[in-house]
Image: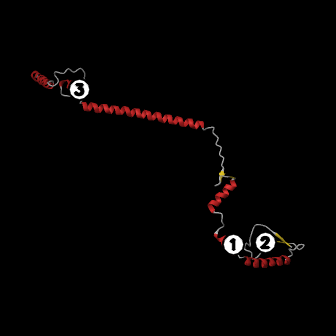
Amino acid sequence: MGERCLARRQQNVKVEEEFDIGTAAATITGRGVASTLKALEQQGILSGPDVEVEERERLQKQKRVMAKDQSAREYENRVRDQQEARDTMESFKDYKLDVELKYYDNAERELATKEAWKALSHRFHGKDSGRAKMEIAKKFDNVAFLEGVGERSFRKAIEWASKYGLCINKTIHVDLHTIPGSHSSCSHSGKRDRVN
């Protein structure tokens, strides 16, 4: 049994010697990854960083710093804009708006509200009467036609008024707009003329 233990111990020593071959000259001061990397670098197994890699890392670091500065500037700008908006709202808090509408025509004369409305209405709808009303007016432009119809209608109106006792002291109130046969047989003007 003693021989077996001795043989095993000798084999373990040989195995440890084989593993110590690469790192025998390096002195390990720590147990972490950094000390291992330093030992590999001292032996020449691990080379130092390239110039290109260092340049790339430097540029990335600059970009990170610039991005951080940019975000800080944007934040400051946002805060400043919000403060300006608050100040503006505060200054308008007691502001009373005074609106005064004035209307002017093409000749630069000041118009009243009613006149301005009328001008706007005429501009939109036009000043002339509609087509149907103009056609009716053309029918009654013939003076001979109006005189004949007017006289006949007037006589009928007088006869009708006297028949129903509407004559008082030979004065008849006749609404000339509603004479039978006139072109405007239903007017709401209420105008009356006296006939003696």
Nearest to the eye among marks 1 and 2: give it: 1
Seen at 69% across and 75% down, the residue is 139
Seen at 23% across and 26% down, the residue is 37
* Label 3 with label 2: CB-CB less than 8 Å: no
The correct choice, above or below, for 80 with respect to 171 in the image is above
Apparent side of residue 35 relative to residue 76 in the rendered image (left or right): left
* SS class, disc 3: helix
Which residue is label 1 attached to? Answer: 137
Q: Which of 129 and 43 is in front in this view?
A: 129
Q: Position of residue 68 (x, y in %)?
A: 39, 33
Distance of label 3 from label 2 (alpha carbons)? 123 Å
Distance of label 1 from label 2 (alpha carbons)? 17 Å
Point out the tag, 3 or 2, that comes first from the N-terminus: 3
Kindly indicate the quadrant of the structure image that contains residue 166: bottom right
Apparent side of residue 104 relative to residue 11 in the rendered image (left or right): right
Q: Which of 68 and 183 is in front in this view?
A: 183
Which residue is label 2 attached to? Answer: 176
* Disc 1 crowd, CA 10 A, few/some/many (<14, 14-19, 20+): few
Nearest to the eye among marks 1 and 3: give it: 1
The amino acid sitting under disc 2 is Leu
Q: Position of residue 94 (x, y in %)?
A: 63, 37
Q: Where is residue 155 in the image (x, y as percent from the top left)?
A: 81, 78
How many numbered circles does the render carry? 3
Which residue is label 3 attached to? Answer: 37
The correct choice, above or below, for 165 with respect to 32 in the image is below
